[in-house]
Amino acid sequence: MKKIGNIAWIVLLAACGQKEEAAAGKKDLPATDSVKVFVLATDSAQKSISLPGELLPYEQVQIRAKIPGYIKKLNVDIGSVVRKGQVLALIDAPEINTRVQELNEKVKAARSRSRSSQDYYDRIGIASKAAGVIAPSELQQVKNQAMADSAEYNAALLAMTSNRQIGNYLAITAPYNGIISKRNVEIGSFAGNAADKPLFELESNTILRLRVPVPEIYTGALLNGNTGDLTTRSYPDKKFKAKLVRKAGSIDNETRSEVWEFEVPNENRQLKAGSYADVKLRFLRQGQSLVVPVAAVVTTLERKFVIKFAGATTQWVDVRTGFNMGDKVEIFGELKAGDTLVLKANEELKAGTKVIAK
């Protein structure tokens, strides 16, 4: 009996030892971490941003004198609203008028010679019909003289017309409707030198051009309504509508932006050309995009990635970011809707790590 008792005690001790070893083995196994995940879905990516812009005249021209002379009369000053064809100033150039009068007299003389030559040729032509009265060579000579006198008359007419046109340049007129923004001459001052400042600067500003450099990331997106809202320093409490009408079509290498040009109605001339503006634009991505929380994207010096949860293990997937919408960001990469991603990703969660998704 004593021998049987000893055997039972040994078996009991062995069983207890096995339990302790099993418990110790469980303690040595590494614990599996749990991470919060979410299911990737598509959404409409949109972004509102404010960009600086510059207001410019719809048209702007420097008005100069076409012929040299002295300013005889000024009809406008800065701020004058003018109409197309309106006389802005008169230039005094007496030699032009004298030259026109001289050419006018030359035209009269040339006309008289031409008529006389033509009349003589007509009479000689009639006489030449009688045999032996006029030699053929004499008839040809008279005809040539009539043609030469007629050509001289036409040349005199052209010269007079040209100088009359130059005489019209004595009146400086507006090429289109607008407002005089600068005046650089006084009555009596000489005008006509190419190196001089222009007489006037004329701006058409009932419609203004608004030029905005749009960052490259937004140039492929749609502009909501093709319009933007702008404010200026002179009217910080007012919003003005601007309509997109044209794009530069290329990216500037220095600024990595494309110039977009808007038109701003300005019938009352409230806005001033040359002003800087703050322009609010709302961009929409064409079609649906993959949108994730900002915390799901890890950015390092070498790469930008999200952590995908697949088969109970992690996988790093490189991505490119698009619109940053505050707490969310648009991403592009080898991903699709329905994939499971780690909600708060970091570099410490290495690829291939076994985790429990929550």
Image (cartoon, rainbow, N blue to C red):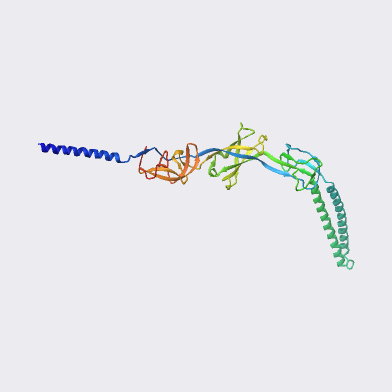
Rendering quarter of residue 141: bottom right
Kindly give the residue lying farthest to the bottom in the view shown: 132
Rendering quarter of residue 255: top right
Please state if 77 lies on the left or on the right of 220 as rendered: right
Please state if 224 lies on the left or on the right of 201 as rendered: left
Q: Nearer the viewer, residue 6 or 300?
A: 6
Q: Quadrant of the N terminus?
A: top left
Q: Quadrant of the C terminus?
A: top left
Percent position of residue 306, x then y: 43, 43
> Relative to residue 129, is residue 101 depicted above or below?
above
Kindly give the residue lying farthest to the right in the view shown: 133
Please state if 213 lies on the left or on the right of 358 as rendered: right
Percent position of residue 333, x then y: 45, 46
Q: Nearer the viewer, residue 186 or 228?
A: 186
Kindly give the residue lying farthest to the left in the view shown: 1
Rendering quarter of residue 8: top left
Please state if 183 lies on the left or on the right of 233 as rendered: right
Percent position of residue 335, x then y: 43, 45
Q: Nearer the viewer, residue 296 or 167?
A: 296
Percent position of residue 338, x then y: 40, 41
Badge count: 0
